[in-house]
Image (cartoon, rainbow, N blue to C red):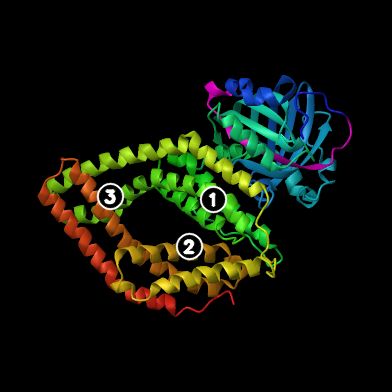
Amino acid sequence: MANHGKPFESGCAGSEMEVELKLLVDRADLDRVLRAGAVGRRSRGPARTSELASAYFDTPDRHLFSQGLALRLRRADGHWRQTLKSAAARGSRGAGLHAREEYEWPVEGRRIDFALLAETPHAPVFARRRVREELRQVFSTRFLRTALMLALEGNAQAELCADLGWIRAGNARAPICEVEIELAPGRGGPAALFGFARELLEEVPFRLGAVSKAERGYAIGSGEPRRPYKAQHVALDEDMSRTAAFLAIAQSCLAQVHANEEGFLLGKDPEYLHQLRVGLRRLRVALAMPEDPDWRVAREPLREELRWLFSAIGPARDWDVFLTEMLAPLLQQEGGDAGLAAFRACCLRLGRRHYEAAREAVRGARYTALLLAIGELLAGPLPAEAPGQAASARSFARAVIERRDRALRRRGERLAEALAAERHRARIAAKKLRYCAEFFAALYPHKRVRRYVDALSELQDVLGAVNDAATCARLIGEAGASGRVDGRTIGQVQGWVASAEARAVERLARAWDGFARRTPFWT
């Protein structure tokens, strides 16, 4: 653990795995954290406050950042410390948890000591002459840190640090107002951090922080606008264990969720909500992949909370799809129809109302508690191997994808004549299968996976269009119940939606045949 606010001993520090939970709090609540009963009950020793000033270094082309490294000099109480941090360890990040390798040394002054960096596994990066010559400060931080030690469950120990200050990059700056809870090396596991945070949440509201100060500094310095974050390729390899693959997949899903939260809460591009929702759906599917009975029992409490969350954010996305994908083409075709214009205005009001309700849910303590519970689940005992089952990532992939593939094929016959409820179940089965195929894609030849997923995506899109039509019919009824739209316009929109549904149904048989002909890529 970093030694904050105290003189540093001389000598070279070795590497440690820094494991911390980051909490984002409002300024008015930062002092409440330090006064909280959960902190008071677990604190050991007095709090201490120090001013910390840090300078982060990189080349103009951000070479260190591209290698997943952060290099800084920090001054506290008149002493300087040089720190090198690596990117988050694979399968160790999510729900506010950060785990990365850290190298830290006392130094004489405000100058990088390359001899110390040569002692690390990252020495080749700094051995390049260009890197050494071009290193310069790219951003800085300055903040007050109030720190105290905590005794947590299971004999775990941690340091709680409440930070208040600024990040500066050129003329740009952003506030720091956060709490870090960092495990003492060798004194407990991440589950203790999540348990304590859930206890603290009962007294003080906060959100989970998925981005380090260094990552924020780089983002501020780049000046590039943040964009909605789509699902990323999951880096798996055949040498990974089943457990490691499962963790990597779950953390990838959590990363997508976290990366879209801020944009959604700020009311920017509606795509943030879409990608947030996709991340949560992928996460729900990932958590259901292991068939271990004890794991099913452990994740059962999350199912109801996930249902609540989807019910809270789903209507906002439904209205967005209706307005942009169903109603917009009709408005374009009908030009200046006054009735349709009034209908659209009514739908916009309803959509905004649902969007605000969705944002309130994501801002709220119940959402944070759900993510903490997911983090605690992933930090605890993981699913056991089934008797006789190989422990490799590839054997896990085969079992998961085969199960999902069979489930879809059972529902796929006679889709064109099926009832709406059966088509809906087939759509859900297709979505789950696609997520699982994409989760494990790195373990198989790209072309074989791509052909299978493309055919599956076409089927999913058609089933989605059929489902969207059913959803739109419900939304039309909601708009009509407002009393602001005339019956003629309601009928006009209903006819348009019915035509769209009929066109989608006509495509079902062909889409199913395209998928049904695809051979398994996982055999």
Q: Which residue is nearer to you in this view: 92 or 130?
A: 92
Where does label 1 land, which residue? 300
Q: Which residue is nearer to you in this view: 12 or 116?
A: 12
Residue 269: image quadrant is: top left
Q: CA distance from mark 3 to mark 1?
A: 35 Å
User: Percent from the top left, x then y, of residue 152?
Assistant: 71, 33
User: Percent from the top left, x then y, of residue 441?
Assistant: 57, 66
Q: Is residue 267 above or below residue 7?
A: below
Dot 1 alpha-carbon crowd within 10 angstroms: few under 14, some 14 to 19, many 20 or more: few
Dot 2 alpha-carbon crowd within 10 angstroms: few under 14, some 14 to 19, many 20 or more: many
SS of the residue under disc 1: helix
User: Percent from the top left, x then y, of residue 41?
Assistant: 68, 24
Q: Is residue 271 above or below residue 410?
A: above
Q: Which residue is nearer to you in this view: 86 or 465?
A: 465
Residue 213: image quadrant is: top right
- On the question of residue 330 being in view, the answer is yes
Where does label 3 land, which residue? 323
- On the question of residue 69 being in view, the answer is no
Q: Which residue is nearer to you in this view: 497 or 341?
A: 497
Q: Is residue 283 left or right of residue 124?
A: left
Q: Is residue 232 above or below residue 28?
A: below
Residue type at tag 3:
Leu
Residue type at tag 2:
Lys
Q: Earlier in the sequence, mark 2 or mark 3?
A: 3
SS of the residue under disc 2: helix
Residue type at tag 1:
Glu
| Residue at screen point 69% across, 44% down | 99
Q: CA distance from mark 2 to mark 3?
A: 26 Å
Q: Which residues are magenta?
A: 10-30
Q: Is residue 432 above or below residue 81?
A: below
SS of the residue under disc 3: helix
Where does label 2 land, which residue? 432
